Image (tube, rainbow, N blue to C red):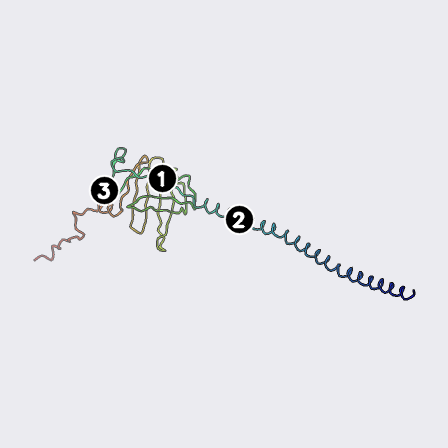
Amino acid sequence: MHKYLLILLLFIIVGLGIWSLKGKNSYPTQATNSTYTEKKHIKAHHVPLMQINSKKSTIKSTLSTQTISSQQQETILYKSLSLEEAKLNTQPRKNVTPIGAIHIASNIATVQVGEVLTLPDIEGEDYKLTITSTHTNPDDSISITAQYEDEGITYTSTITQSSISNYINLSTANGLYEIEANNATGYIYKTDTIREQMQDTSKNDFIILPIPTNMVH
């Protein structure tokens, strides 16, 4: 009888030992699962923060682009006409052949420094001039200075507009041009052509001085 009791107690002690070991081994698993859950939770909350920073960068980039676009607003000064159309309203200079005709389409009184003023189709070229200064004259006419670059060289031009006339002195890599318009219609000239007409070619470039009478024998 005592023998059976000892065997039963031995089984009970072994059973308690096994149960105790299983209980201890289960705790790290729970801790590990808890730690994994916390890490996953933290990681999940970092994604929206990156998205917010990305959205902020996108907004700044958009605002910067809008500012540049505003500064580079383009105004087309005139539209091209045929010489026949222009002559219905005004005549070109006498004895000077224009290379084109135009109709003023924009009022330069509304342009601002930093904007782009385009002069299209001058011997096949479009000139985009960036306005550097504007000035209102005592007679209420408007004068602006503008420039553009070609192969690292800066060319400066002046434009004056009154209520009835426009005058443009355009400096380019292809030479100098003058644009004159009355009542919004006018012509494009090469400056060299105007100078040739203004010069009296019938006269020589030298002067013959008379011989003093006291030297005549």
User: Which x, y percent locates residue 191?
Assistant: 27, 47
Q: Position of residue 37 (x, y in %)?
A: 68, 54
Of residues 60 and 98, which is closer to you in this image? 60
Helix, strand or loop at label 2? It is helix
Q: What amino acid does circle 1 point to?
A: Gln
Q: Is residue 68 left or right of residue 90?
A: right
Instruction: Tell me if residue 173 comes above or below residue 136 in the rendering.
Output: below
Name the spot of residue 103 as percent of width and height, x first. Answer: 32, 37
Q: Quadrant of residue 143?
A: top left
Secondary structure at badge 1 equals strand
Task: Return the residue at label 1.
Answer: 161
Disc number placed over residue 97 in the picture, else none: 3
Q: Residue at x 31, y 44 (%)?
A: 121
Earlier in the chain: of badge 3 and badge 2, it is: 2
Task: Say which residue appears at 31% left-offset and 52% top-offset.
Answer: 173
- Left or right, 211 with respect to 97, comes to left
* Label 2 sits on residue: 58
- Separation of marks 1 and 2 at Cα, in angstroms: 42 Å
